Amino acid sequence: MKIPKEARKISRELFQASLENGRLNQTRVRAIAQQVITTKPRYFSHILKDYERLIRLELAKHHALIESAVELDEASRAEIEATLRSRFGPDVTTGFSVHPELIGGVRIKIGSDVYDSSVRERLRRLDSALA
């Protein structure tokens, strides 16, 4: 379903109002969402859907998913977390998961960025180069 331009513009303005020093303020987010629900402006359902999408994307920018072929030890986890915090800011949260199909190496997803140094990805690139 296509969102009207007016609704998209309003949701962007609401999103900007939700930020405090470049970071989301949860209290503002709740207050803004509640205000939209109670006032029910034109296209309010579209506004809320787009506002939720913008909030979700902003939250994803600050969460890193680290995938590895084997369980990482605490020292490796701490080193990866420290590197991510130095690069993306101190409020980055992390989640670790094991995916044996990676064969070896690590894949890190943060927001829409993917840093893939897995053996599976290297083999895929080699296959593409040879084909």
Image (cartoon, rainbow, N blue to C red):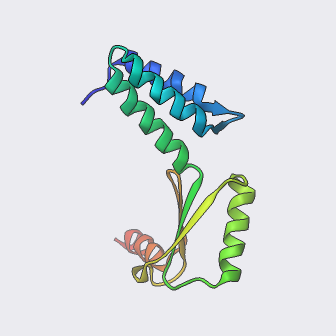
**Image quadrant for the C terminus?**
bottom left
Q: Is residue 86 above or below residue 4?
A: below
Left or right? Give the position of 36 relative to 29: left
Q: Is residue 103 above or below residue 20?
A: below
Q: Residue at x 53, y 21 (%)?
A: 13
Q: Is residue 62 above or below residue 2?
A: below
Residue 102: image location, x then y, percent? 44, 79
Q: Nearer the viewer, residue 11 or 129?
A: 11
Residue 97: image location, x then y, percent? 48, 74
Total labels drawn: 0
Q: Residue at x 63, y 32 (%)?
A: 19
Left or right? Give the position of 79 relative to 67: right
Residue 64: image location, x then y, percent? 56, 60
Left or right? Give the position of 86 relative to 27: right
**Image quadrant for the N terminus?**
top left
Residue 31: image location, x then y, percent? 53, 29
Q: Residue at x 68, y 61 (%)?
A: 84
Q: Nearer the viewer, residue 60 or 130?
A: 60
Q: Residue furthest front?
A: 38
